[in-house]
Image (cartoon, helix red, strand yellow):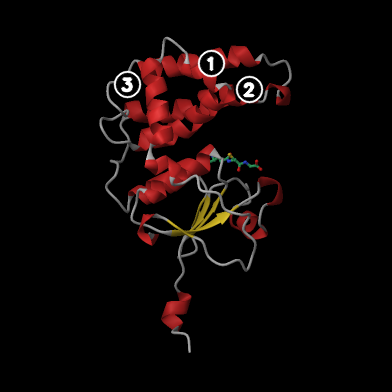
Amino acid sequence: MADPLQSSKRLPVLYSFRRCPYAIRARIAINQSNKAVELREVVLRDKPNHMTQLSPKATVPVLWLEDGNVIDESLEVMAWAANYSNWTSLPLNMGERDVVSRNDTAFKSHLDRYKYPNRYPNTNALDHREAALDILRGIEATLNNNWLGGHQPTFTDIAILPFIRQFRGVDAQWFDNLEDIPKTISWTNRFLDWEGFKSVMIKYPQWRPGDSIITFGISSL
Ligand SMILES: N[C@@H](CCC(=O)N[C@@H](CS)C(=O)NCC(=O)O)C(=O)O
């Protein structure tokens, strides 16, 4: 007979989408922590009912904790994961908070308009590329080491690099040959080569109710 204590225990569940930069940063933070979660891969045009019941705003990532609480903002998922490890220090200082919030507002807005100009009326993609690049020039001026805070990736690196990866991906050849942001180019490529990034980009099939559990996180290894 199943042990009732055992069977009532479950892992936190993470609804995620492989290519989403918000979900990527959440997965990296979890993978750097000592927590394992059950990963449920979402297809955005066919979201699971359970996910939208938990979080009616229906964006990924959504983390459903063991106690039933829901975290549906990626920065908060990162902060939750950071509680279970010492890979980064929180709270962010004022400079770090500025960098993350500029990424999530202005940079993300320019990125979307550069990447998908047809979705926005009267939009010139290259104007938005230039505006996003200007934000990267600001980061360039602060990059003195391999990562923003020194020799290890910090919360801020992980929070913003998935978006810079997307920006690069629109035209990687153009990005990799920019002459005025050499440190940013190396930093971005360092991220793409980093095991902490590569290991969260494994492909999983769309999750459906009843599927067997996919455990995700370093402690599951
Ligand atoms: N503020 C949210 C934003 C998350 C978000 O916008 N995720 C996108 C995918 S990258 C999404 O789920 N969009 C809903 C959709 O496309 O239906 C967070 O940080 O978690």
Give 151 or 75, whichever is nearer the viewer.
151
Marks 3/2: CA–CA distance: 26 Å
Depth check, mark 1 against mark 2: the one in front is 1
Q: Identify the residue at image location x=46%, y=25%.
A: 102
Amino acid type at image mark 2: Arg
Is 118 on the left-hand or right-hand side of 136?
A: right
- For label 3, the SS is loop
Identity of the residue drawn at 52% across and 27% down: 105
Circle on res. 143: 3
Which circle marks residue 113 in the picture?
2
Amino acid, disc 3: Leu
Q: Earlier in the sequence, mark 3 or mark 2?
A: 2
* Alpha carbon distance from label 1 to label 2: 17 Å
Q: Earlier in the sequence, mark 1 or mark 2?
A: 2
Query: Residue 4: which disc?
Result: none
Residue 81 shows in the view:
yes
Q: Residues within 10 Å of mark 1 (few under 14, many from 20)?
A: few
The residue shown at (32%, 28%) is 148
Which residue is identified by label 1?
174
Location of residue 150 in the rendering, given as x and y in whole percent from the top left corner: 26, 30
Q: Is residue 76 visible?
A: no
The percent coordinates of residue 43 (x first, y second) are 65, 49
- Which residue extends farthest top? 179
Q: Nearer the viewer, mark 3 or mark 2?
A: 3
Quarter of the picture containing the C terminus is bottom left
What residue lies at 59% left-to-right and 16% top-to-bottom?
Answer: 128
